[in-house]
């Protein structure tokens, strides 16, 4: 592991077998890029990161794997965007995807296989989320696998709701000469919704588990109540698969949700693992951490 400077930002680099991971542990605890050095001398980007960010702040760049905490997606309270109702009935503001992606983090541990970071809480964060807690992010790097754990520890005397997630920007297509139409997304879900502005989720009748990534109807889909706690992006023949799955714990996958999203003519496709559907506080799908307890959400991304 070494420190390097990229576009005026200090980041760290891990080389594990054929994989190289670039991350910004202290700023957003965010992985920026994951690429694999292939046997033929070529390089395959797994996690997309733009080549020129022109001095932008890292949390504003469309790439990497932003951390979504304490809630993934937009919050709505009685139709009012960016607000939520606390368990005691009070109303508070809540930015889209929470605030961890722009927070500072302190090192708990860091070594050649990954790192563990604790979020530094500010007064603004406490106004959004007024609880006594610790939030940590743990990365574990393997040769062809990445594990990310989000851990919430309740240090107060009242239960804490949360519904965090990850926002990986997968490099698709990852080979020249291919397009989105050459790739499939496979998710087996009992319920599929189309997410719309205002927090509405409209049920979809088409629940085909395999869809081409160039299907415009796939953008802003919410996959819920999964048959298996995983999603896969692959070529049409099923080869060169990226598998995203939840691991660990007796309740693995029971509340896991995937959200599919991209922008036209971009070099990425986002398949986002969340703890529950968007607007979780309003639709009552948050998880609760009891006083003195901890909860963990661990996602594994592997090249299968």
Image (cartoon, grey):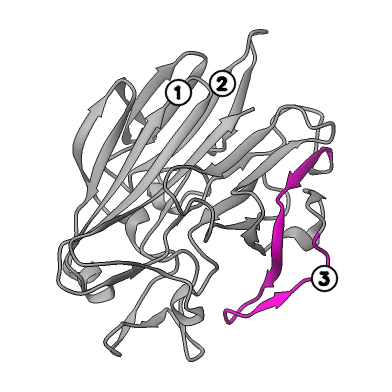
Rendering quarter of residue 102:
bottom left
Is residue 139 at least partly visible in the picture?
Answer: yes
Checking the image for residue 142, the label placed there is: 1
The answer to whether any part of residue 53 appears in the image is no
**Circles 3 and 2 in contact, beta carbons < 8 Å:** no
Tell which residue pokes out farthest to the front in this image: 250
Q: Residue at x 56, y 43 (%)?
A: 245
Q: Earlier in the sequence, mark 1 or mark 2?
A: 2
In this picture, which residue range is highlighted in magenta? 182-207
Residue under pointer 2: 36
159 horizontally vs 147: left or right:
left
Q: Position of residue 118 (x, y in %)?
A: 22, 47
The residue that appears at 23% across and 76% down in the rendered structure is 127
Residue at 42% across / 60% down in the picture?
A: 164
Q: Is residue 20 above or below residue 168?
A: above
Of 96 and 157, nearer the camera is 157
Q: On the rendered structure, is 256 left or right of 190?
A: left
Against 221, residue 50 (above or below) is above
Q: Which mark is residue 205?
A: 3
Q: Quadrant of the C terminus?
A: top right
Q: Judge whether residue 86 is colored magenta.
A: no
Q: Secondary structure at mark 3?
A: loop
Q: Give percent across and percent down for residue 154.
A: 21, 62
* Pointer 1 or 3: first along the chain: 1
Task: State the residue in front, 198 or 297.
Answer: 297
């Amino acid at each position: 592991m070494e420190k390097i400077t990229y576009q005026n930002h200090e980041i760290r680099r891990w080389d594990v077998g054929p994989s190289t991971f670039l991350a910004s542990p202290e700023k957003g605890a965010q992985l920026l890029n994951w690429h694999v050095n292939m046997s033929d001398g070529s390089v395959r980007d797994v996690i997309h990161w733009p080549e020129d960010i022109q001095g932008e702040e890292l949390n504003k760049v469309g790439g990497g794997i932003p951390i979504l905490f304490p809630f993934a997606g937009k919050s709505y309270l009685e139709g009012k965007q960016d607000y939520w109702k606390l368990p005691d009935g009070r109303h508070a503001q809540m930015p889209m995807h929470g605030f961890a992606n722009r927070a500072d983090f302190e090192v708990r541990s860091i070594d050649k296989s990954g790192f563990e970071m604790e979020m530094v809480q500010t007064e603004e964060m406490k106004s959004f989320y007024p609880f006594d807690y610790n939030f940590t992010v743990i990365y574990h790097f393997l040769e062809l696998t990445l594990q990310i754990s989000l851990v919430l520890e309740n240090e107060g005397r009242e239960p804490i709701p949360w519904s965090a997630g990850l926002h990986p920007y997968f490099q698709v297509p990852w080979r020249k000469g291919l397009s989105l139409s050459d790739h499939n997304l496979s998710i087996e879900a009992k319920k599929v919704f189309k997410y719309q502005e205002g927090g509405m989720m409209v049920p979809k009748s088409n629940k085909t588990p395999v869809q081409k990534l160039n299907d415009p109807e796939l953008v802003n889909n919410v996959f819920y109540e999964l048959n298996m706690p995983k999603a896969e992006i692959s070529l049409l023949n099923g080869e060169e698969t990226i598998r995203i799955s939840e691991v660990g714990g007796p309740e693995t996958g029971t509340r896991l949700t995937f959200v599919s999203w991209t922008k036209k003519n971009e070099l990425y496709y986002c398949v986002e693992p969340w703890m529950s559907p968007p607007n979780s506080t309003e639709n009552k799908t948050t998880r609760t951490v009891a006083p003195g307890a901890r909860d963990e959400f661990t996602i594994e991304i592997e090249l299968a």
